[in-house]
Amino acid sequence: MELQQMRYVVAVAETSNFTRAAERCLVVQSALSHQIARLERELGAKLFDRTSRRVRLTPAGEAFLPAARQALDAAERARAEVAAAAGEIRGRLAVGAIPTVAAVDLPTALKRFHLRHRQVRISLRSGASDELTERVRQGTLDVAFLGLPVGVRPKGVRGRELARGELVAAVAPGHPLAGTERVELRRLSDEPFVDFPPGTAARAQTDEAFAAAGVRREVAFEVTNMDFMARLIRQGLGIGMLPAAYVPELPDLPVLRVRDAPARMEHLVWSLFPPSPAAAAFLSALGVPAAGSPGSPDP
């Protein structure tokens, strides 16, 4: 069994198409198909069901895919470790971040890292804090920037608190509350809200604050990204609760400080296992000691 064969299987699984997989792997389709057929004979099982319309994994393929990915990751990690021993940082850096990360200027941090370590392939995934934490635990992300209610600590990862602050209410220009310096949480309960879906850490921050105040509210619009939330707020369809530190990103939206405001903490998390050379270099650039070194935060 060869790493190249595993790479072909992963490519077909991710594209659901032999032609696109061959293009991704920079080989002709016949060569890719031949190698996968050879691997299937070696394993004694078909990995893909092929029809004229689609390609999908068989149960055997579903079982094989995670191991293939792990083998490819291990091989890449081994090459990166050898390069690091010679003083060169290479490999991949997979970063996750909530849409409202504000404690770190992430685009600038990634740009500086790229300029210093051009052999590292950087990827970024935006998502909810719970999803990103799970991806760090699984090893598909190296580090992640989270936003959590005060007192909530991510489990199964190493981490460091970056910042904490209050949420503010954002309203449309021309809203009756625009220009108000501070409002009671109870006053906002009469307004329709734009918020993230239930079960997300971002939603929990606001839900818990309203529950603690004994106030009910209506979330009329549930969204999964901040840009869409801001668009709905601008149209006057609802108000939203945003981190105060993120407000400068939306200068056209009037914001109100809120008494008994929801609070949140931003965290940086990474795996319990030793970080890759690229991840260790990125953590170092952020002023965070690599796992296992003096001063490293405990899980």
Image (cartoon, rainbow, N blue to C red):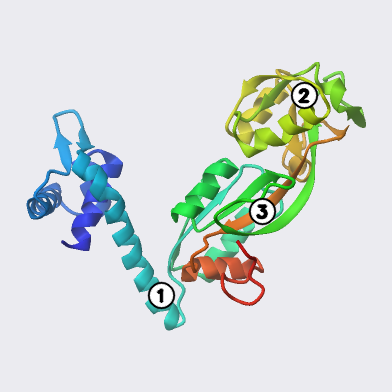
Mark 1: few, some, or many residues within 10 Å (few <14, many ≥20)? some
* Badge number at residue 195: none
Q: CA distance from mark 3 to mark 1?
A: 27 Å
Give the residue type at disc 3.
His
Q: Secondary structure at mark 1?
A: helix
Position of residue 92 relative to residue 135, above or below, is below
Q: Earlier in the sequence, mark 1 or mark 2?
A: 1
**Residues at discs 3 and 2 in contact (Cβ within 8 Å):** no
Depth order, front residue of 123/131:
131
Position of residue 73 relative to residue 147, above or below, is below
Q: Which residue is mark 2?
A: 172
Give the residue type at disc 1.
Glu
- Relative placement, left or right, of 141 versus 58 is right
Figure quadrant of residue 111 = bottom right
- Relative placement, left or right, of 42 versus 292 is left
Figure quadrant of residue 112 = bottom right
**Residues at discs 1 and 2 in contact (Cβ within 8 Å):** no
Mark 2: few, some, or many residues within 10 Å (few <14, many ≥20)? many
* Badge number at residue 81: 1
Of tags 1 and 2, the one toward the viewer is 1
**Residues at discs 3 and 1 in contact (Cβ within 8 Å):** no
Position of residue 250 relative to residue 70, above or below, is above
Task: Classify the position of the C terminus by image quarter.
Answer: bottom right
Of tags 3 and 2, the one toward the viewer is 3
Give the residue type at disc 2.
Ala
Residue 49 is at least partly visible in this image? yes
Residue 119 on image: x %, y % = 43, 68
At horizontal 56% and vertical 66% (from top left) the residue drawn is 282
Q: CA distance from mark 1 to mark 2?
A: 52 Å
Q: Secondary structure at mark 3?
A: strand
